[in-house]
Amino acid sequence: MENDIINAISEIKGIDLRKAFDIYYSSKLAEQISNGSYGIENMDAKYLAEDLIENEPDIFE
């Protein structure tokens, strides 16, 4: 799932995979998935990527 989210971030934002990887692993979303919070692991990767982009804009600067 994490790879799918990273790919979606890269695709949506038009950035390379390495940068998307770094962004994902510095996000609150990565921590929530790691902890199994809120049943997130059952959600769609593209939706989660869009949610990360919308709710954590600071990590893209």
Image (cartoon, rainbow, N blue to C red):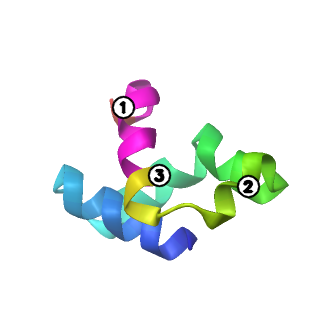
Q: Quadrant of the C terminus?
A: top left
Is 26 located above or below residue 20 in the figure? above
The residue shown at (43%, 41%) is 51
Q: Going 36% across and 31% down the picture, which residue do you hit? A: 54
Residue 29 place in picture, x, y as percent: 61, 45
Residue type at mark 2 is Gly
Q: Are marks 2 and 1 in contact (CB under 8 Å)?
A: no
Which numbered circle lies on residue 54?
A: 1
User: Mark 3 highlights which residue?
Assistant: 48
Local SS, label 3: helix
Rendered location of residue 27, percent (x, y): 57, 41
Residue projecting furthest to the right: 35
From the viewer's perspective, is 11 left or right of 57? left
Q: Earlier in the sequence, mark 2 or mark 1?
A: 2
Secondary-structure class at tag 1? helix
The type of residue carrying mark 3 is: Leu
When the figure is inspected, residue 42 is found, relative to residue 51, above or below; the finding is below
- Is 7 situated above or below 48? below
First-in-chain label (3 vs 1): 3
Q: CA distance from mark 2 to mark 1?
A: 20 Å
Q: Position of residue 2 (x, y in %)?
A: 56, 69
Give the dominant element type of the magenta stretch: helix, strand or loop.
Answer: helix
Question: Distance between the Cα atoms at labels 2 and 3?
Answer: 12 Å
Residue of label 2: 39
The residue range painted magenta reads 49-59
